[in-house]
């Protein structure tokens, strides 16, 4: 495999073939893509491996240029593997264009049932011996990558030297409905903090939602912008800088036209870029399935639970005079109506929501007997992963050490980079 260079790094692209269903190793195969990164000048060194599992589900591994974010710190002692998890990036990508090759919605849903954390970990265990010669490796899991790492500890701890988790300690038992029941109040707090920082956005958000309620609005790229879809811009409030980006997005929403005020093309294009799942449709398709266990359907849990929080209803908010609530980290049936990247997959999503053959993802007994060094960054009031759930899980994994901080938001491993990785390595090695 040829290697190539970027500033301070040498990269090698790898492609692997793995079973779609690891229970049927001689059956259909899919392709995995992963990029090996090593510090320039250390290409021939005998370095331990660190595999990075990206958040999501549905996002390919980050495309670094050089030694940015946490990567530079990792390259001081590791050979890093940036894995595109199955269905993402260059790993047999899943989207509205490729899924029809599987057949109809039933065949598509059956196919996607093999794209959860358990299959991702089996992929890792398939390729690990090919790269490390059989030696265990370190796993760095961000967000959903941490969910995968927790399953790894349950299913194949012999493959792990160390586990580092950032913003991704899942509940071991909570069904999807309980996950969202805990999520709505967290989102509400983030929205309140945004409006406290930018009080002018209270009127702006209400004006935009009122305009959308009165006028059917379709972006230049075909996204139907409803009040509910607009509310979902709150998804960005859980990352560092997200509140500021939302403020800048809202400030130029309207322009004056010959027919009166209208939402500007620039605003609509930027909203489409923020809301569309074209680049990561698996996030929408599988988001609730990552919590599916014990043969229970997820059954559009976020939509069901939203009814328990009527204050999030856009029409109710607009009928009053208070701030418009925003939402985030929830997927709803209407996502598959408004987004052209998801519209053809609506029936497939319905079948996944009704599926009842989800198997357990975590083994509490095995985690209680864990011997792998584990350290986890838990972000105080994380919008995407409930802090109480994370700390409960931390107590259930033998030897796990936590760093609870409000210095960063959910994407702290990106924003904090080297410091976050330094802290977790020190905790895992019992140096703190």
Image (cartoon, rainbow, N blue to C red):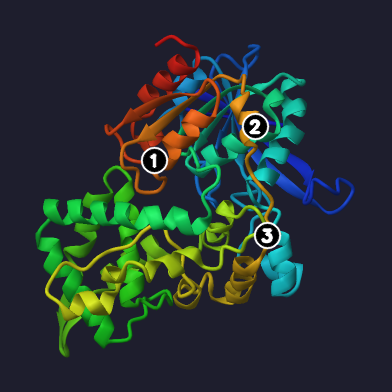
Let me know if residue 263 appears in the view: no
Residue 329 placed where, x, y %? 41, 56
Image depth: mark 3 or mark 1 in front: 1
* Mark 3–mark 1 distance (CA, rounded to whole Å): 30 Å
Residue receiving disc 3 = 112
Residue receiving disc 2 = 365
Going from the N terminus, do you reach mark 3 or mark 1 first?
3
Let me know if residue 147 appears in the view: yes
Quadrant placement of the N terminus: top right
Going from the N terminus, do you reach mark 3 or mark 2 first?
3
Of 29 and 348, the residue lying toward us: 348
Residue 361 placed where, x, y %? 64, 44
Contact (CB < 8 A) between labels 2 and 1?
no
Residue 360 shown left or right of residue 334 in the figure: right
Disc sitting over residue 388 in the figure: 1
Q: Residue placed farthest to the right in the image? A: 26
Residue 116 placed where, x, y %? 64, 50
* Mark 3–mark 2 distance (CA, rounded to whole Å): 28 Å
């Amino acid at each position: 495999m040829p290697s190539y260079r970027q500033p301070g790094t040498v990269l090698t692209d790898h492609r692997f073939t793995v079973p779609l269903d690891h229970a049927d190793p001689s059956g259909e195969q899919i392709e995995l893509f992963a990029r090996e990164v090593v510090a320039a000048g250390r290409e021939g060194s005998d370095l331990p491996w660190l595999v990075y599992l990206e958040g999501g589900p549905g996002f390919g591994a980050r495309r670094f240029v050089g030694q940015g974010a946490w990567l530079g710190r990792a390259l001081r002692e590791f050979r890093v593997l940036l894995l595109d998890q199955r269905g993402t990036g260059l790993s047999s990508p899943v989207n509205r264009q490729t899924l029809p090759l599987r057949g109809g919605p039933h065949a598509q849903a059956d196919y996607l049932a093999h794209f959860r954390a358990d299959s991702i970990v089996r992929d890792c265990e398939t390729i690990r011996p090919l790269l490390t010669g059989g030696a265990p490796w370190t796993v760095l899991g961000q967000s959903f990558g941490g969910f995968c790492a927790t399953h790894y500890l349950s299913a194949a701890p012999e493959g792990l030297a160390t586990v580092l988790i950032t913003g991704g300690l899942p509940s071991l038992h909570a069904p999807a409905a309980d996950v969202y029941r805990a999520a709505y109040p967290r989102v509400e707090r983030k929205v309140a903090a945004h409006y406290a920082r930018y009080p002018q956005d209270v009127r702006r958000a209400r004006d935009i939602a009122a305009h959308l309620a009165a006028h059917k609005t379709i972006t230049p790229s075909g996204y139907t912008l409803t009040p509910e879809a607009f509310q979902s811009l709150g998804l960005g409030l859980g990352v560092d800088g997200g509140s500021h980006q939302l403020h800048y997005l809202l400030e130029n929403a309207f322009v004056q036209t010959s027919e009166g005020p209208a939402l500007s093309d620039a605003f609509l294009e930027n909203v489409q870029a923020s809301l569309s799942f074209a680049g990561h449709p698996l996030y929408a398709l599988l988001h609730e399935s990552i919590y599916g266990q014990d043969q229970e359907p997820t059954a559009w849990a976020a939509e069901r639970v939203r009814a328990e929080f009527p204050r999030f209803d856009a029409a109710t908010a607009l009928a009053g005079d208070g701030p418009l609530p925003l939402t985030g980290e929830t997927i709803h049936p209407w996502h598959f109506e408004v987004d052209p990247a998801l519209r053809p997959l609506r029936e497939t999503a319905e079948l996944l929501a009704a599926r009842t053959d989800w198997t357990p993802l975590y083994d509490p007994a095995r985690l209680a007997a864990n011997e792998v060094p584990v350290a986890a960054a838990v972000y105080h009031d994380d919008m995407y992963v409930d802090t109480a759930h994370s700390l409960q899980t931390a107590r259930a994994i033998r030897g796990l050490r936590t760093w609870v901080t409000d210095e960063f938001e959910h994407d702290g491993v990106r924003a904090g980079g080297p410091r976050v990785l330094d802290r977790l390595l020190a905790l895992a090695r019992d140096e703190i």
